[in-house]
Image: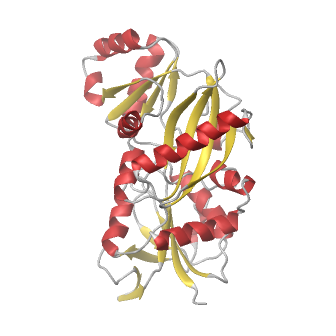
Amino acid sequence: MKKLSVCVLFGGMSPEHDVSLRSAESVLNNMDPEKYNIFPVGITKEGQWILYGGTDYSLLPGEKWLEHPDNRKAAISPVRGQGLLTFEGDCVVRQLLDVVFPVLHGENGEDGAMQGLLQLAGIPYVGPHVSASAVSMDKTLTKLVADKAGVPQAAWHLVRRGDLDGRMEQTLDTLEGRFAYPMFVKPSGTGSSVGVSKAADRAALAKALTDAAAFDEKVLVEEFIRGREVEVAVMGNDSPMASVCGEIDSGADFYDYDAKYVTDTSTAYIPARIDADVEELVREAAVKIYSAIGCQGMSRVDFFVTFDDNKVIFNEINTLPGFTSISMYPKLFDASGIPYGQLIDELLRLALEA
């Protein structure tokens, strides 16, 4: 059987660059070289594309991969039939690609930008296509779809960066009129909890809004939901399937970036500590959101299950979820009977199918 030529994209010009390197390390180490011709292409924080010339993927975190002597400048051409271009002196080498796995998180990787390039190039790729990626990345647009789909979610309010310039006090008054403390404040278009804060009073709320606005022009403010943080991995095109549910106990004030990737305070429970009937409601809601947005390939859908009455409350969707060794997406499917290597095979198959 012909080996597929697969380009794995990692890094990127995003606050989640470092997380992407760790995800790509795991993906590349779990891809079967007997099945695939692998072309690992890293995008630096400055936007340079480099075909990594080595095979030691442990060098990706920490950026040591950049020092490999066999690295070559690279690009994916938007012209159909060109594929991956690498540059050796005055020569350009063309490599046709069967499929791309964009292991990219956040801005310019998960928001539809990279998907648009690959769509123009006519190259199949893992994960949702342009519109679904864009809607899922912008949490305020996701909220509108969830409302239309009838999926319960936390009450929310949109604040724009301009609302903070000379109108901070009025904005704070509006938010305090809507929500009790604490409130959650998020940049509309980041993942991995980058720029997210939990504000317990007016001063903290003002700081949280300013901090979030540094990442995005749109800032989402949400009511606090007291409940378990439950996550579901979804995979598929026309007939998506949901994994078992997992639960995150952050061991901190909330599941922020440090709790996810820096400290060891968080604990994952697979399956989640919820009743079977509640788990089924979560899984059904995950597929409903996935389908309403128009996702393909994969996404991870996050919920709260309230402590008091087991209500299922939608939180957010991640179209290119973490694939690190501790990430929930591969762990949830592993617990559902699909180990990491097989999961990659299936995601690549779905990309070609779509």
Q: Residue at x 62, y 29 (%)?
A: 305
Nearest to the observer: residue 249 or residue 282? 282
How far from the left and from the top, in percent, is residue 340? 69, 63
Any part of residue 154 in sight: yes
Q: Residue at x 40, y 53 (%)?
A: 294
Q: Quadrant of residue 276?
A: top right
Any part of residue 248 in sight: no
Q: Quadrant of the C terminus?
A: bottom left
Q: Quadrant of residue 166?
A: top left
Q: Residue at x 57, y 35 (%)?
A: 303
Q: Give the residue furthest to the front.
A: 277
How far from the left and from the top, in percent, is residue 309? 64, 20
Asked if residue 128 lies left or right of residue 266, the reply is left
Q: Quadrant of residue 295?
A: bottom left
* In the depicted structure, whether residue 261 falls above or below residue 12: above
Q: Residue at x 64, y 76 (%)?
A: 55
Q: Quadrant of the N terminus?
A: bottom right
Asked if residue 251 lies left or right of residue 290, the reply is right
Nearest to the observer: residue 56 or residue 345? 345
How far from the left and from the top, in percent, is residue 272? 72, 38
How far from the left and from the top, in percent, is residue 94? 40, 87
Nearest to the observer: residue 261 or residue 350? 350
Q: How many marks?
A: 0
* In the depicted structure, whether residue 241 falls above or below residue 285: below
Asked if residue 247 lies left or right of residue 44, the reply is right
* In the depicted structure, whether residue 280 falls above or below residue 197: below
Nearest to the observer: residue 71 or residue 11? 11
Q: How is the image coloured?
A: secondary structure
